[in-house]
Structures are given as C-alpha cells and as structure tokens.
Image: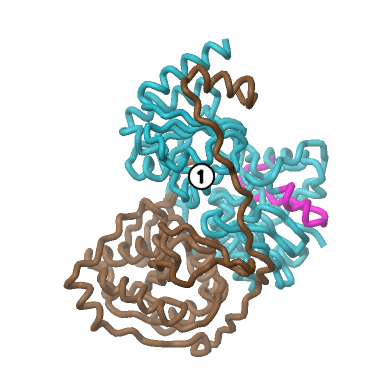
C-alpha cells in the first residue's frame, strides 16, 4: 500500500506575522517558512506505518510556489520516498487543493492519504474532508491513533468531550491532531540522501483543475488590540479587584 | 431562501453553542431552519424549536445519525441543500468534521470560523492564530459557513417553531462507529463557561493539576482549561486544550495559572472579558494580555487564592 502525504509550506509557527501596509494580506517576504506542523505529524505517521510493514511507499506532495520544493525536501529527509510538486502562483484555496489531490490520488492510487487537520496560516481545517468527499472515501479527522488493518483502518479521533474510534472501510482519509505522534528530526545523512530523491513537477492544468479563488479577500486587518493591565501585589488585592473593580466573582 | 443551521447535541440535550451559531445564522438575513440529526433526539428538536427566531426545526431521527459520522450526515445535508442559500454550523469537532465534506460535494469553498457577518455573503474570520482578521466575500451560489461561537452572543428562548420530520438519506456505508469515551463532568463546558481556570506546564504533573487547578475551578464554579504544553505533558485531557488548534473561548473571567502565553494559546482566550495571570516569570507574555497579573509561584498562590475567594463568597 502506498501512502500519500500532502505537505504545505507556511510561515514558521514561531514567527509573529506582520500585515502588509496596504491591508492586502500578510507579509511573506523575508519570513522564515517551514512545513505546517500538522503535516510533519502526518509525514511521521506515514513513515511509522511503513516501518511497521503496513505501507510500501510514502509519497509527499506539495502544492505551492517553486520554494515548496524545500518543504518536500524536508519530508524526504524525514524518510518519504519521493515527492510531487504541483507548482502554482498565488493563493490556492482548500477546495482547489482537494481537487488537485484527487488528481494525484487518481495517478498514484494510495491506500491512505494522511493530511494535517489544518494549516496554521489560513486555519481553514477543510482539505482532508473535502478530498474525502471528492473521492467518495471515508474520513477520520483529528486522529490521535491510527491502526491499519486488513482492508481499512481503525482510527481514534479527538472530539469534544473525549475520544471516538471509527472503522474506515477501504482506502481512506486521515487528518492528524497534535497527539498522534512526535515527528522525528531529519538526520544529516538523511538530509544529504534526500537531495538525491526524485521530485516530479506538475501543474494544476495537468489535473484539469481551475485554481481561481472562490473567496474574495476584501481586507486583512489587525485584530482589536488588548492592553496589558496592572500587576497586583498580593492575592488579597487580586481578589478584591476581581470583586469590586471587575465584578466577575 | 433560508439558512440551514446544524444543531450541536448529544442526542439528549441541545448544546448551548447552537444558540450562539443561531445568532450568526440569523444575521445573514434569511429565515433560519435548524437541523437536528440524531437518534432519539426529539427532546433536542423541542429545545431548538424554543429558540427565538427559528422558523422551522427539521428532525432526522435515525440510527444512521446516532454518532453524526461525517459520511451519512454529509449525504443528508446535501440532500437538503437544494432548499437553502446557506448551510451553517458551530465550529465544533462535529461540524468541522462534516461541513467541508458538504462544501466539496456542493462545489463550494467553505468559510471557516467566522467571527462577524458583514453581509449575507461577506464575513470576517481570523487567520494566523488570530493575528490577522480577514474580510472575505464568497462568490459561490451557496454558502457553507462555520461559526466561532465565542464571538457571538446566544439567541435567547422565546420561539415555538414547528418540528418537521425528514427521512434519512442513503447510507454511504464507508465507516462504522466502534466506540466513544466521553468524560463525564459536573463542571460547565469550556465553550459555555462564564469562568475558566486554566493550567500550564508549570503545574508540573497530572496529580498537581488535580490538586491545584481543579479545586480552584470548583470553588469558582468554573470550567477547567489547559495550555497545549500541559496537555502534551499528559497533565490534562486533550479536550481541555485552549488555543489556536484547541478550543477558542471568551468567558467573563479567564484565570491563567502557570501559562507563559504562547501566541497559539493567546489565540484561544484573548477575547475573554477579564484575564488574570499568575506566573513566576514576570516577563511571561501572558502578562501582556492580562488585566490583572500576579508574579508568584502557583503552588503558594493557588491555595491562598482559594481561601480568599471562599472569604469573599462567604
């Protein structure tokens, strides 16, 4: 069984983003970019399944600008076998990403696609569910445990209030939550080896997908600010302020 | 046409986030119908019918929807979608699971996690963990929208809508429910609580979390939250996590104990009305958003705090 893992190049999670002065979006020039953290968890899970003998090949795919090949190299350095770069300019929304991934799935015929539950840039939390819909496959989002068994997968999901376990029949979509695993760091020899692994280049047109956005961004603005308040000297003072000044207890 | 709102529930009770999402749905300017999909969920439909401004409640009562698995629920929503301009749900684990599936089946780009309805086709939503707010206009014929419920007030009761039964849609038979473990608790739910007491990595252990954080929460009648660091370390269960990728909350009072205040955590609580932070590091970023900060060791501060609160509550 092949496993397909889509990975997205995003602003590093440690970077505090700045807005462009014209309100058109977030400043991406000269900002550190990394693989979306949830996608690292997805790569790790795919590699563990391969190491456990449940999968034969792990294919990483990224949809984005030429520099997304760096994100693919990271996945290859972690241990993925090969990469596919679907080159695009500008924003590609989750619906278009899902359509492109459907095309990739058609060519590669994986038994499992593991995706991050959300990207930390647009915070959409949509692509995995949309891909499952377009393929007519079962989905298990927000996974904290994945067991691959004959003809399907047993997936435990983080839901409101606790955990839920589902059995998925046949090829399936899984999206990762934080507690699924702790991704490995790529070792130096593996980073060197990754440079020789193949990355195929494609375009959305190869899959017949129109990536024109459906959502028109009218404005990007700073959130309403919150000012630091006061430091209190004692617990008694704190409780008095909460009672008399704020009136919340 | 109308707006279809998905009710959040557990088959026995209507979850309070539904009334908040209803406020957003009603702001889209069309009559709102509420869909209750579940098993033996008539009581939930009756509760939804009482919410002010609901025109009609659709009840799909079938074993197929007992656990609201994405595939059958999406099939049901798609079968109903023809009569609606918009399909709306609260940003709960359940609706976040199913709505993008519905959107893709309808060839619609979903608008996730809206915090404001600007116009029936235009919404504000946070990106980058709430560090920027984007205003987006949907050019799709139908809208599929999830609502960040912390940003909307609850619609009060005061209606008496008719309840109409709808038949089950066909079963895609792609997945089966195996089991569920839901923690039973007498405490209020995180997303509905007026007060939240939250612990971070500095708490130190699961035992200390139970010994320090939880009794203080109970003294205040509060829900318990946790930072990602505390959840990752196993001090608290995952559904207590507040932050960009956990729950987003906006209580009257948020008490952050031993939480340093990473931007991902702030994303989940900075809309709280009053924020209290206790941390022994006076440079901790949490103090930049706190209305009241106390520099100190939570091990000594929390018992004092509990005693002092008991005094004022008398």
> In the figure, what tint was chain B given?
cyan
Foreground pick, B210 / B41: B210
Q: Is residue B1 above or below residue A239?
A: below
Horizontally, residue B24 falls left or right of residue A202, namely: right
Secondary structure beneath dot 1 equals loop
Q: Which residue is mark 1?
A: A160
Q: Is residue B23 above or below residue B107?
A: above
Foreground pick, A199 / B86: A199
Across and down, in percent, residue A204 comes to 51, 85
Q: Quadrant of the C terminus of chain B?
A: top right
Horizontally, residue B275 falls left or right of residue B258, namely: right
Residue lying at 46% horizontally and 84% vertically, measured from the top left: A87
* Magenta stretch contains residue B25: yes
Q: Chain of mark 1?
A: A
Residue lying at 82% horizontally and 57% vertically, measured from the top left: B30
> In the figure, what tint was chain A given?
brown
Across and down, in percent, residue B134 comes to 63, 62
Q: Quadrant of residue B201?
A: top left
């Amino acid at each position: 069984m092949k496993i397909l893992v889509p990975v997205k190049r995003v602003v590093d999670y440690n970077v505090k983003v700045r807005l462009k002065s014209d309100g058109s979006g977030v400043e991406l020039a000269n900002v550190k970019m990394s693989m979306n953290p949830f996608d690292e968890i997805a790569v790790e899970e795919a590699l563990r399944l391969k190491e456990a003998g449940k999968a034969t090949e792990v294919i990483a795919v990224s949809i984005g600008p030429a520099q997304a090949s760096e994100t693919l190299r990271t996945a290859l350095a972690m241990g993925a076998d090969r990469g596919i770069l679907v080159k695009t300019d500008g924003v590609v929304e989750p619906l278009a990403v899902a359509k492109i991934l459907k095309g990739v799935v058609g060519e590669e015929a994986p038994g499992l696609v593991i995706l991050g539950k959300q990207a930390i840039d647009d915070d959409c939390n949509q692509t995995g569910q949309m891909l499952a819909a377009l393929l007519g496959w079962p989905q298990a989002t927000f996974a904290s445990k994945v067991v691959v068994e004959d003809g399907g997968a047993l997936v435990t999901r983080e839901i409101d209030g606790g955990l839920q376990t589902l059995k998925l029949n046949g090829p399936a979509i899984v999206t990762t939550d934080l507690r699924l695993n702790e991704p490995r760091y790529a070792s130096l020899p593996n980073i060197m080896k990754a440079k020789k692994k193949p990355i195929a280049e494609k375009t959305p047109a190869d899959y017949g997908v129109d990536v024109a956005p459906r959502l028109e961004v009218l404005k990007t603005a700073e959130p309403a600010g919150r000012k630091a308040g006061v430091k209190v000297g004692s617990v008694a003072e704190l409780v008095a302020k909460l009672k008399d000044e704020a009136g919340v207890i | 046409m109308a707006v279809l709102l998905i009710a959040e529930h557990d088959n026995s009770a209507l979850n309070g986030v539904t009334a908040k999402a209803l406020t957003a749905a009603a702001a889209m300017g069309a009559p709102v119908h509420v869909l209750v999909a579940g098993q033996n969920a008539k009581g939930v439909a009756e509760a939804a019918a009482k919410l002010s401004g609901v025109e009609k409640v659709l009840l799909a009562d079938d074993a197929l929807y007992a656990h609201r698995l994405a595939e059958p629920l999406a099939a049901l929503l798609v079968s109903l979608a023809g009569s609606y301009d918009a399909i709306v749900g609260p940003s709960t684990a359940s609706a976040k699971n199913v709505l993008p599936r519905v959107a893709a089946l309808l060839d619609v780009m979903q608008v996730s996690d809206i915090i404001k309805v600007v116009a029936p086709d235009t919404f504000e939503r946070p990106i980058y963990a709430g560090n920027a707010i984007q205003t987006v206009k949907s050019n799709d014929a139908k809208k599929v929208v999830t609502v960040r419920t912390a940003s909307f007030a609850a619609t009060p009761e005061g209606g008496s809508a008719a309840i109409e039964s709808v038949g089950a849609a066909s079963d895609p038979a792609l997945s089966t429910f195996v089991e569920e473990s839901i923690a039973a608790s007498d405490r209020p739910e995180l997303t509905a609580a007026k007060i939240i007491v939250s612990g971070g990595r500095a708490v130190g252990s699961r035992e200390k979390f139970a010994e320090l954080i939880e009794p203080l929460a109970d003294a205040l009648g509060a829900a318990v939250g946790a930072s990602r660091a505390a959840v990752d370390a196993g001090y608290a269960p995952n559904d207590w996590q507040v932050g960009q990728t956990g729950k987003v909350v906006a209580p009257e009072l948020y008490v952050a104990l031993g939480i340093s205040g990473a931007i991902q955590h702030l994303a989940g609580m900075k809309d709280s009305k009053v924020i209290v932070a206790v941390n022994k590091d006076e440079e901790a970023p949490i103090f930049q958003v706190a209305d009241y900060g106390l520099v100190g060791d939570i091990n000594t501060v929390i018992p004092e705090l509990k005693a002092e609160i008991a005094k004022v509550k008398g």
